[in-house]
Amino acid sequence: MTDHTDCVFCAIIAGTIPATIIAQNDDILVIQDIAPKATIHYLILPKKHIKDVQSFGPRDCCIAGKMFKMAQQLSQEDPHAHEFRLLINSGYTVGQRVFHLHAHFLAGAIISEF
Ligand code: AMP
């Protein structure tokens, strides 16, 4: 579905780099963040490689809805994640370091601020 050379999240999606998988469906993969900033810190990734929000094409718009729907599912499955924060860094200067679109899903106690 996706496989961009040098993209760590594509490698995780392809199964060539290990990650703790929290949930997935045909379009979305949810993994545990390797350096959590809250007691619950997941990354919601589209399986299709999209660099950032600025790179959304006309056929990618439903991806955002699917990411929201997955956030809702995660919150419904865990009472500790009933209320949560969704955060997207889109561009280097605002903190994006992995250039495969992802939403940080944060809940529970904050460990460190972004
Ligand atoms: P951002 O700075 O918004 O691009 O977020 C990138 C996030 O990816 C950071 O919170 C990292 O801790 C996380 N991350 C980087 N590499 C991995 C990995 N191999 N497995 C899980 N999370 C990762």
Image (spheres, rainbow, N blue to C red):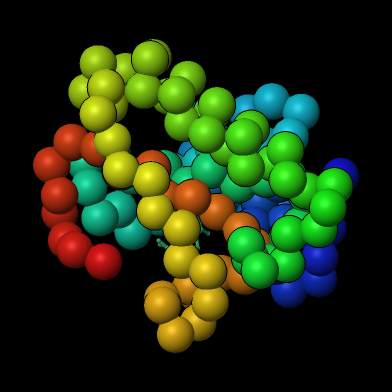
Q: Which residue is drawn at 81% across and 71% down?
A: 5
State the image coordinates of residue 36 (x, y, percent, origin top left). Answer: 30, 53
Q: Is residue 86 visible?
A: yes
**Along the viewing direction, whichever of 56 and 74 lies nearer the viewer:** 56
Q: Which residue is drawn at 54% across and 28% down?
A: 70
State the image coordinates of residue 86 (x, y, percent, origin top left). Answer: 38, 45
Q: Is residue 6 above or below residue 56?
A: below
Residue 51 lies in quadrant: bottom right
Is 35 situated left or right of 22 in this image?
A: left
The quadrant in which the C terminus is found is: bottom left
State the image coordinates of residue 103 (x, y, percent, origin top left). Answer: 49, 50
Residue 72 lies in quadrant: top left
Q: Which residue is drawn at 38% across and 15% down?
A: 76
**Along the viewing direction, whichever of 55 and 37 lies nearer the viewer:** 55
Q: How many labels does the image show?
A: 0
Is 100 situated left or right of 83 in this image?
A: right
Q: Is residue 78 above or below residue 26?
A: above
Residue 98 lies in quadrant: bottom right
**Along the viewing direction, whichever of 39 and 20 lies nearer the viewer:** 39
**Along the viewing direction, whichever of 4 and 91 lies nearer the viewer:** 91
The quadrant in which the N terminus is found is: top right
State the image coordinates of residue 24 (x, y, percent, origin top left). Answer: 63, 28
Q: Which residue is drawn at 55% across and 54% down?
A: 102
Q: Residue furthest front?
A: 58
Q: In this view, does 112 lie above or below 74?
A: below
Is 68 situated left or right of 66 in this image?
A: left
Q: Is residue 8 visible?
A: no
